[in-house]
Image (cartoon, grey):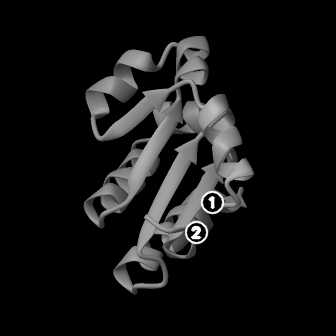
Amino acid sequence: MTKNDTLHIVWTNSDPVTVKLMVFMYATNSLLKGWWKHVHVIMWGGATKLFGEDPDIQAKVRAFIEAGGDVSACRRCAEELGLTEQIETFGDIDLLYIGQDFTKLIKDGETILTI
């Protein structure tokens, strides 16, 4: 993957309207319409809690993955919120301690959108 072809969306927002009508609308359409070749969503903080509580959001995440998107989630957030097993069971989400990887993205000059 090259920087010019990849968008990393850091999803921290826990507002379901923003998540449905911005984060995953844009992320999924970016893949389906070819705006970006690769889209990677990083679920972090309040987003992790919302994901665990809202089946509609889970469906948006599933549709994004099925469109070819990649999702990573903060393992520490999942542990703190008691959601590790739920995220692991959902499948197709890389659950990891995200700080080091996120720092690398920044230092490497990757394209990052934070919401």
Query: Disc 1 vs disc 2: Cβ atoms closer than 8 Å?
Result: yes
Looking at the picture, which amino acid does disc 1 mark?
Answer: Val
Identify the residue at horizontal 43%, vertical 47% (top origin): 71
Taking depth in this image into account, of 53 and 82 the one nearest to the observer is: 82
Looking at the picture, which amino acid does disc 2 mark?
Answer: Leu
Residue 35 visible in this rendered orientation of the protein: yes
Taking depth in this image into account, of 31 and 105 the one nearest to the observer is: 105
Identify the residue at horizontal 36%, vertical 17% (top origin): 85
Q: In the displayed structure, would residue 31 be above or below residue 67?
A: below
Residue that carries the numbered disc 1 in the rendered image: 17
Identify the residue at horizontal 44%, vertical 78% (top origin): 29
Measuring from the top left, give residue 20's x and y in whole percent.
54, 62
Residue that carries the numbered disc 2 in the rendered image: 21
Q: In the displayed structure, would residue 56 be above or below residue 78?
A: below
Measuring from the top left, give residue 80's x and y in whole percent.
61, 13
Looking at the rendered image, the quarter that the N terminus falls into is: bottom left
Which element is circle 2 on?
helix
Identify the residue at horizontal 41%, vertical 75% (top origin): 37
Measuring from the top left, give residue 10's x and y in whole percent.
64, 50
Q: Residues within 10 Å of mark 2 (few under 14, many from 20)?
A: few
Q: Is residue 92 left or right of residue 28?
A: left
Q: Is residue 101 left or right of residue 89?
A: right
Measuring from the top left, give residue 102's x and y in whole percent.
65, 41
Taking depth in this image into account, of 80 and 110 the one nearest to the observer is: 110
Q: In the displayed structure, would residue 55 be above or below residue 40?
A: above
